[in-house]
Image (tube, rainbow, N blue to C red):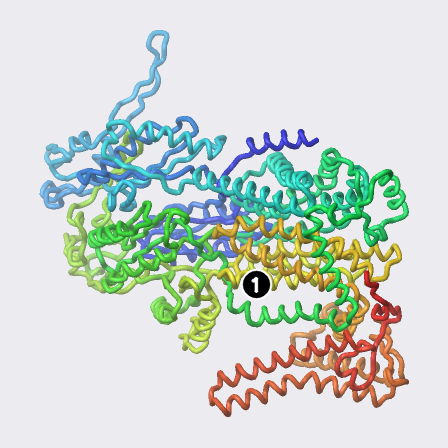
Amino acid sequence: MLILIVLIGTFAAIRIPKESNPDVNFGMVVITTVYPGASSQDIDSLITEKVENQIKNIDGIDKITSTSVDSVSSTTVMLKNDADADTVTSEIQDSVRQLSLPKDANDPVVKKITSKNNSLFNLVLYSKNQNFNVDYLKERAGILENALEGKGAIDQITVTDGDKYDIEILVDQTKLESLGIPLSQVASSIQAFNSNQPLGTHKIGEREYAFRIDGEVRSIVELKQLPISVAAGKVTTLENIASIKKVYADTTDLTVGNKAQGDIGKVAVDIMFEKKSSSSILSAAVEAKKRIEEEMKKQIYHDIGYFYTNDLGEYISEDYSDLAVNMVSTLAIVFVIVSMFVGGMESFIATISIPLAFFITFFVLNFFGYTMNFLTNFSLIICLGIAVDTATVVVQGASEFIKLGYKPLNAALLSVKTYKNSLISGTATTVVVFFPLMSLPGVMGKFLAYIPITIFVTLLASLFISLTITPALFFKSSREKKLFTPNPDAELTLTEDEKFILAQDRGDKVEKTESSQRSWRDKIFDPLNAWYDKHLGTILQSAGKRVIVVIIPLVVTIFTMWLVSPQLGFIMMPASDNEYLTISLTAKVGLTKEAIKEKSQEIHQIFGTIPELVNYTSTIKGNKIDVLLRISKKGERKRSSFEVEKDLVAKLDHLVMQGFQVAVATRGNGPATGKEIGIKIIADGNVSFDKLSKVSRDFKHFLASIPGTKNVSSSSEESAGQFLFELDDQKLALLGLTPQSIGPSLYLALNGLEAGSIKGEYDTHKIRVKYDDFSDGISPEQLMNTSIITPAGKVLLGNIGSYVFKPSTDAITREKNQITISIGANLENGYKAEPINAKLTEYAGKYQFPAGISSSAGGETEENSDLLLSLLSALIFSLIAIFAILVLQFNSYTQPTIISYSILMGFVGGSFGMLLTGHPYSLMFMIGFIALVGIVVNNAIILIDSANENMKLGHTRADAIRESARSRLRPILSTTLTTVIGLATLTSDGFFAPLAYTIMFGLSIATVMTLFAIPALYQDEYKLRLLIKRVLLKPLLMIGVPGGLLGMVYLICLLFGIPFIGTVYGNAAAIALFASGMLFLIGAELVKNCRGEQGWRQHILGMIPYSLSGEIRPRQIIKRILIKFGVFLLPLILGLLTGGLASLVSGNVFVSQTASTVMTIVAYLFYLVGNLYSFWTSPGHQFLHDRFTQIGFRLKKHEDQDSEPVHNQ
């Protein structure tokens, strides 16, 4: 079987597809509509709003957001988790086809978004020779594309803004008017002389041939010679009346720097390479680069440099290298640690369980059609430090049985028999905590669903190997010992059959008696065992010490949540020290592209001064410069990326004074999650956009003034503005015109006419004919001098109208069909989001919003609120599922509660780990803690299960848990160390570090507390059961009974259509009914207690009240109630008094409130600790108010262990 697993695993590991991201259906549909020349406001009202209203009632849609920019409307539809994406997409397509849009608008394009792509990398070609312009580079890029596309593993090659240009024919209007022909006739002539005409198929002899007229124009040279008919039968050529030029569509100016070659600020083009679907990304990337290098050696690429960006092959290769390094490191660490505890051969057997489990995982994932990607790698890394635990437990157990005198076979079988239930439960608890991750909402949730799948397979494979192959390997590799070490305590826990087998296996073996015969391991760990046993025995003998051990985790947890957690804050995906920085520079409104280009040259020189620079790409589009800057790897530089970021901010600061908005940030890990700080300004349909913009500017300025914020931005920035032409209706009527009739003439003057196309070598190029008046730019004054043809002759536009300038916005966003502006900011390194968001919320609360405008929370937390809520729900579900599994195993509710107590210290340890290492709470912390929940309970499960078995053999509770803890000390320490040190290899990775630290610190502290707190709680299981009934179940019963009756009344009213809850009188009646029900039940219980009888709740819960001074008297009951409420209110009174005193001394309201809050919390903490200590140590298990009245409670089934002696062993 071992060989089979290795063979099929190796084959699967080679065959399974490797990719960067998993193939995820995002549940997202994007509707894009192009309306050339329309402003963002026109796009919003004429396109976007109509699209949203048309599709909003389609089933399966969860959320609709949209963005309107100049000429383009983009509507994003998020689908519900259970929606069928194909069906909903089809319904959206059918629905938008019915829209009535402006005639010049293109048809809406509906596209379903998935993560699947075959991208390899981007190749950047740049000019080393300043005489080479972008046209030269694009020509070479086209040659490269033609040479490599479709070759080998390369599928498609796309040159960004490559040879996709239009041909613009700029007609001299003066010449055209002198010839007496309109512009439309020129366009018609071009189309007429640029077409092929089929003449049909005709037979010549025995063959049929196709006949056609070849009239197609194939080049600009031919286009220039096209004849244009003019008056009186004369003909001229196109070049006599027009000039012709190429206009690259949607041009983006790309400039790059490559530090290794000393090239800074070079003109460049970007080429995207895609692999064939059947190819592996790793081999395809290597092959493609080899072909590129061979091609680039040719003379035609002389003086052209190149480098790669977005290299997915490199990223994936690094991922697998990291996985391999982590695996080898972890295996070595596991081997060393387990060797220290049991031996070299045993350690080897435990260690190989990890690769065997991975082999099975590779096979299962490949069999079911999954791929290897960064999420499966991430999951395997999580499992590295966990999967070995089960094998370690079995091997160490078998090793201990051999030391006791068993033969290897019986030792292996007995170890499996002893620990199988605990290992199955432990694996189940670890697996079940990840189960809810399969159904998280949103894009992030669909990605995270790949984590539990891999973890399920790996951990279940590990369990299977540990219970089958591991004991078999142990048996085959172990030699029978000639010596045995007697252990009377361990032998007491054996059954009669096991003792019989032990006696037979010992046979002629010799007992170890001299200390010198002990192994070096025993010499190290025996004193540790003795120390632990001594101190545990001391704790178990004293109720006071037991309660202290139990209270410490509780108090520390409260302290952590009160003081530590607020200091950490929460960032979904915090940036880490990595190789990439993003730089965004937005020019002031109205700055020309030429001016921005000139300024960009200065910026490139600044980039060249960064010592860590590897390369960068800089794009200019509109008035914005976007830069992706790559620096050397973390181990190859002295400064962190955050220090480089600060250096760049300082060097670019002078641009702010020149009107630029500068944003520099270290690129975050994982999918984009929005800015950490944010707020949304929302308007209804009747509010003017100008008012909304003013409010958004106020909030933007306030957010920028808060220390700790950077890169403050708005989703709707002010653009260069717009010119509105206002026509005189009276003059139009006199001339027989309307606004609608002159619109086409103005559009023609500004934008020209389409006149067919020319097929180039690689693409088809549209031909556009227009007047040359506005070829070099346009002003309103020029347009006012444009002639309009009317029935009465020509008239200037300026004679029939005027123009005004108005501000405008670059984008309009909508959410839930409401216009929304999102204001956001990033955090400076070291700052927390919560206090800044609090200030922003406070500002919003005091702001005087105009009618119809409001605000709501924004930023990454709001964007991912559903995900965070689902993660919290997943954690709660996991805790319930773990509890249910443990209840089934132990047939008890109290023992699972004891086991779950270790989770508290896991949270404490994880939180302090974040604090000490400087990490905030994050998504990685949450995933790490969910994993930690499943891990920390495993040691407690084995302790409790072993103690229960000991009690079945007749041991006292104290002896049973003491022997269980003593025998499990070494395995617990070894499994904890293997997990903690195994995960230490991940701490150098900025992405995985929070997860690793969470598990490392959480498991370490939880293990220490498990060794003391769990035995103490087990010893006092009776008290814990009584405490749960008094503190938790009694209040639940008091609320549940009247609440249940109220619910029944509500259902009856609902059934008969009687209005009840929801109306003023109905709500008042419900409150009165609930309160009167509680008062009646309290009164009935008091009457019973005053008679010395059980109250109704005490009867249900099996609790019996009694007096330590004789019979219960009514005065004791009344006194107990009064003291109970008095003691409960005392901390609150102390807090109020402290606050008043602080106010008198300082006169500061904030100081007064803080002092009052702190005193109240501290007093209640002392109240809690005092009550627990009193309950644990008093003879009648009394709280503080019970002790004043000498009243106690006990359960009908009395199992108090305080009276049991703890044997000194």
Residue 129 shown left or right of residue 258 in the figure: left
Residue 1036 shown left or right of residue 355 in the figure: right
Residue found at the far bottom of this picture: 1144
- Above or below, 660 against 151 in this view is below
Horizontal and vertical percent position of residue 1129: 67, 85
Q: How many marks?
A: 1
| Residue 1039 in view of the camera | yes
For the point 50% across and 92% down, which residue is it?
A: 1144
Q: Nearer the viewer, residue 40 or 671?
A: 671
Q: Nearer the viewer, residue 1039 or 131?
A: 131
Residue 693 shown left or right of residue 816 in the figure: left
For the point 39% across and 66% down, which residue is it?
A: 709
Quadrant location of the C terminus? bottom right
Q: Nearer the viewer, residue 30 or 239?
A: 30
- Above or below, 121 against 590 in this view is above
Q: Which residue is mark 1?
A: 911
Q: Quadrant of residue 206?
A: top left
Q: Quadrant of residue 810?
A: bottom left
Q: Secondary structure at mark 1?
A: helix
Horizontal and vertical percent position of residue 754: 26, 41
Horizontal and vertical percent position of residue 478: 74, 36
- Above or below, 991 against 566 in this view is above
Q: Residues within 10 Å of mark 1 (few under 14, many from 20)?
A: many
Quadrant location of the N terminus? top right
Q: Nearer the viewer, residue 1013 or 274?
A: 1013
The amino acid on which the numbered mark 1 sits, given as a three-letter code, is: Ser
| Residue 1053 in view of the camera | no
For the point 33% across and 18% down, which residue is it?
A: 210
Horizontal and vertical percent position of residue 1110: 90, 85
For the point 65% across and 79% down, which residue is it?
A: 1164
